[in-house]
Image: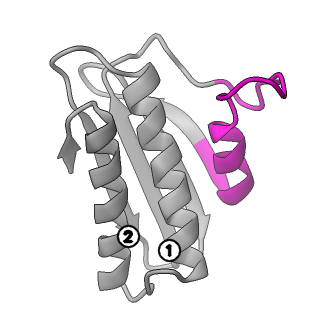
């Protein structure tokens, strides 16, 4: 799914991710739904804040594998701005905790090069 690199685009991505989960049998408000909603919100917010290039959108892909793993991928246009694992933050800062949440909630996460322009930040959640 393709979205504008804006707060509105990130919000829409989060809402559509929850809707997709419903079609897969994970009810809105359930543990899986709330976890995916949080992770998608964080990854999309990062794509909008740190991966934005004017005139370029970001992409969200979600797959439910046969083994029950949900894979989430968010692609943006900034290859040079790679997220850093476990970056220490100052408790007074208002941002910088998103990837810590993703790391805590996901079984695995990482960054991959995107064919063409940008990067993909992905994570997998065991259900």
Q: Is residue 119 left or right of residue 43?
A: left
Looking at marks 2 and 1 on the same chain, the residue that comes earlier in the sequence is marked by 2
Q: Which residue is at a point 39% across and 89% down the rendered structure image?
A: 25
Provide residue 3's location: percent of width, then percent of height. Answer: 21, 41
Residue 32 as seen in the image, left or right of residue 55: right
Q: Is residue 113 visible?
A: no
- Mark 2 touches mark 1? (CB < 8 Å): yes
Rendering coords of residue 127 (x, y %):
59, 78
Residue 120 percent coordinates (x, y) = 41, 34
Is residue 95 rendered magenta in the image? yes
Q: Which region shows up in magenta? A: 84-109
* Nearest to the observer: residue 54 or residue 91: 91
Residue at which label 2 appears: 18
Query: Is disc 2 surrounded by few (<14), some (14 to 19) or many (20+) residues within 10 Å?
Result: many
Q: Position of residue 103 (x, y in %)?
A: 70, 47
User: Is 29 included in the stretch rendered in magenta?
Assistant: no
Indicate the secondary structure of the residue bearing disc 2: helix
Q: In the rendered view, does 9 fall on the left or right side of 55?
A: right
Magenta stretch, overall SS? loop
Looking at the picture, does residue 13 appear above or below residue 78?
A: below
Q: Which residue does the numbered mark 1 point to in the structure image?
A: 33
Q: Residue at x 26, y 42 (%)?
A: 9
Q: CA distance from mark 2 to mark 1?
A: 6 Å
The vertical placement of 79 against 22, above or below, is above
Residue at (60%, 79%) from the top-left corner? 31
């Amino acid at each position: 799914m393709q979205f504008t690199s804006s707060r509105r685009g990130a919000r829409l991505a989060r809402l559509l991710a929850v809707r997709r989960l419903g079609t897969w049998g994970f009810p809105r408000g359930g543990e899986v739904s709330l976890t995916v909603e949080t992770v998608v919100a964080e990854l999309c917010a990062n794509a909008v804040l740190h991966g934005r290039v004017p005139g370029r959108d970001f992409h969200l892909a979600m797959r439910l594998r046969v083994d029950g793993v949900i894979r989430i991928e968010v692609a943006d246009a900034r290859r040079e701005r790679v997220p850093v694992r476990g970056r220490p933050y100052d408790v007074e800062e208002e941002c910088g905790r998103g990837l810590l949440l993703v790391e805590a909630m996901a079984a695995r996460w990482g960054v991959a090069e995107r064919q063409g322009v940008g990067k993909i930040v992905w994570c997998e959640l065991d259900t």
